[in-house]
Image (tube, rainbow, N blue to C red):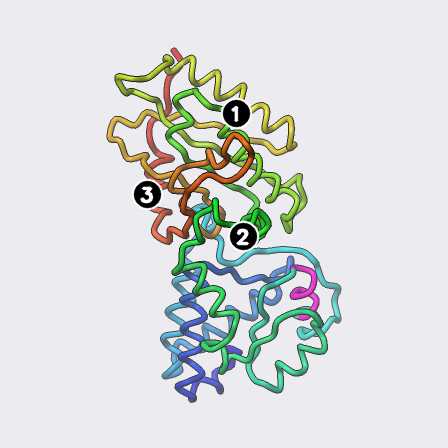
Amino acid sequence: MFDSEHFSDSAYHLNVEILLMGIATNGIVLVDADKKLYDQLCDKVEALAGTGKGKKTHILFEELLKQKRERKIVRFVTCRPKFENGRSEEEMVATLAIKCRSDTLIVSSPEEAAKFAMMARGSSVVPTSEYIQSDAEARRRHFSEAHLPPLDTLRPEVFDKTIVQATKFSKQLRFYDAMIGKGTGTSRFRDGIRRILKLWRDGSHFGRENLSAEIYTVVDKSHYRKKKPSESYYIVKKELVQRLQDELGIPINFFFKEDDSRISHCRMLQTESICINFDQGFDIFKPDGSFRRMVVNLYPAGEVHLSEYRNLPDFSLT
């Protein structure tokens, strides 16, 4: 789809631009474990730098590449399966779409779509020229622009499916919730975080041995606090972090931060590609096990703020 010959068509390059901007907001690109497809993709796009209508595509692609793995915004996920020498590119792509349960396979033309529909049975295949009007773009836009209905109005399976969709291609999750640092109600936070971690663990594309999580919270310095910071630290460490590790078999690092500047109002789940806002935090269940009233939505600008959150000074136990 990135062959320069296609970009003489203004409608074609517009579809590609919308696709790449969508990936930057809430998408990823899947490549083979040996990155053969990834290297070819880069070569194709590089050739567009001097090709009229292709220049904008080249710029957008370069912007995606700047989202480095160390920032945990992973736009290109290296994943199984590996491919033996001699397999055609078409076979690699079709197998990748099937094995990774990709949402959509984007190809250059209706003719290519018909071919790949036969090769990658069960996968959604969309010609580039039809991408803007496709169901794939409509679904992507829905999740980026719309709030989910309040959790207490959702069927549990809808919430579960959404969490799996958002997390399955991440090796690490980060939870941010200042209220956890109070050291009270840890069982309620544990229930909410456990639900998300279990969905992620069981639905992850990667083996469980590759998964890890982090929990960030802050010292409660209010006049109404019920526990000393050191007491809260040990309660959260024991009753939340350690119990979740023991139950789920996922390593969890705990960060207890000093927040004199009071920037830690957000309650977010961060995957390696997106930030999701939980407006009432991870105490998501009522005593009867049903969802509390809260709104969950994508927070595209969250990475910069969460980087500041992570850089807050650590609480000293001495």
Residue under label 3, please give it. 305
Residue under label 1, please give it. 187
Q: Residue furthest top?
A: 318
Viewer-closest of 280 and 58: 280
Which circle's residue, 3 or 1, is located before the other in the chain?
1
Res. 178 image quadrant: top left
Res. 255 image quadrant: top left
Q: How many marks?
A: 3
Q: Which mark is residue 162?
A: 2
- Classify 139 as above or below 151: below
Say what amino acid the circle numbered 2 marks: Thr
Q: How far apart, in angstroms, are the residues tagged by discs 1 and 2?
A: 24 Å
Q: How far apart, in angstroms, are the residues tagged by discs 3 and 1?
A: 28 Å
Residue in the image at 57% along x and 47% along y = 156
Position of residue 291 measured from the top left corner of the image (x, y, whole percent): 50, 40
First to last magenta residue range: 94-100
Position of residue 263 measured from the top left corner of the image (x, y, whole percent): 28, 35
Say what amino acid the circle numbered 3 marks: His
Left or right, 293 with respect to 3, comes to: left
Position of residue 86 measured from the top left corner of the image (x, y, whole percent): 75, 71
Disc 3 is placed on an element classified as helix
Which circle's residue, 3 or 2, is located before the other in the chain?
2
